[in-house]
Image (cartoon, helix red, strand yellow):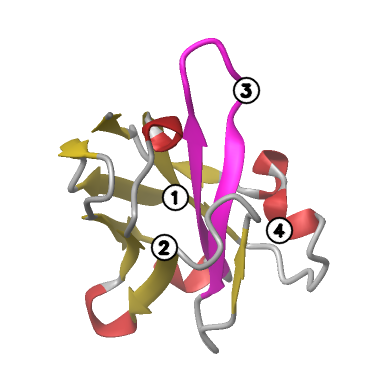
């Protein structure tokens, strides 16, 4: 089992920044990649970003490319999501997820079903 705990959410004005953190514990040796997803009220959970845990390669949703950056600190078993130039439409609950999948497919890594472990979520609210 892998446990994930997110932190760093909050209320910010449009154009502002936030950094989310996700600390992993347990059988982290089984984790191949980490990802961030988000879910706004009344909408389906959507992919935001993912990172290969060992080599650090990343992939982003088009809606956040150039504004968000995912990174990891292997020593701390922590993944981060730096969110800049935030927009009201970024308002959502943000979830950290971990996957044992080694698939290189850009389609596979964006699917929620690829990720086995999930955090409890952290609220991000962007005011206009």
The residue where tag 3 is placed is 44
| Contact flag, marks 4 and 3 (Cβ < 8 Å) | no
**Label 1, on which residue?**
1
Closest to the camera, between mark 3 and mark 1, is 3
- The mark closer to the camera, 2 or 4, is 4
**Mark 2 vs 3: CB contact within 8 A:** no
Tag shown at residue 27? 2
User: Of the numbered discs in the image, which one, if any, rests on residue 109?
Assistant: 4
Principal SS element in the magenta part? strand
Please determine whether, in this image, residue 78 is positioned above or below residue 126.
below
| Disc 1 and disc 4 in contact, CB within 8 angstroms | no
- Say which quarter of the image contains residue 107: bottom right
30 shown above or below 8: below
For this rendering, which residue is in front, 72 or 2? Answer: 72
Residue 32 lies, in percent from the top left, at 58, 71
Q: For the residues marked 1 and 2, what is the alpha-carbon distance in whole angstroms?
A: 6 Å
Residue 41 located within the stretch drawn in magenta? yes
First in sequence: mark 1 vs mark 4: 1
Residue in front for this viewpoint, 50 or 2: 50
Mark 3 → mark 1, Cα distance in angstroms: 26 Å
Which of disc 2 and disc 1 is earlier in sequence? 1
Q: Specify few, some or many for label 1: CA neighbours under 10 Å numbering under 14, 14-19, or 20 or more.
A: few
Quarter in which the C terminus is drawn: top left
Disc 2 to disc 3, how far (Cα)?
A: 29 Å
> Residue 121 at x, y = what percent?
34, 34
Q: Residue 115: x and y, percent?
A: 61, 48
Task: Look at the numbered disc 4 and give the secondary structure of its residue.
Answer: helix
First-in-chain label (4 vs 3): 3
Q: Which residues are magenta?
A: 33-52
């Amino acid at each position: 089992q892998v446990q994930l705990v997110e932190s760093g959410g909050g209320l910010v004005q449009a154009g502002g920044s936030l950094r989310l953190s996700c600390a992993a514990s347990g059988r982290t040796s089984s984790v191949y990649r980490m990802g961030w997803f988000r879910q706004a009220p009344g909408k389906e959970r959507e992919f935001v970003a993912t990172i290969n845990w060992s080599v650090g390669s990343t992939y982003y949703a088009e809606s956040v490319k150039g504004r968000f950056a995912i990174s990891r600190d292997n020593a701390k078993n922590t993944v981060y999501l730096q969110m800049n130039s935030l927009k009201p439409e970024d308002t959502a609950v943000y979830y950290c997820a971990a996957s044992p999948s080694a698939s290189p497919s850009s389609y596979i890594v964006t699917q929620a079903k690829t990720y086995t472990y999930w955090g409890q979520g952290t609220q991000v609210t962007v005011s206009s």
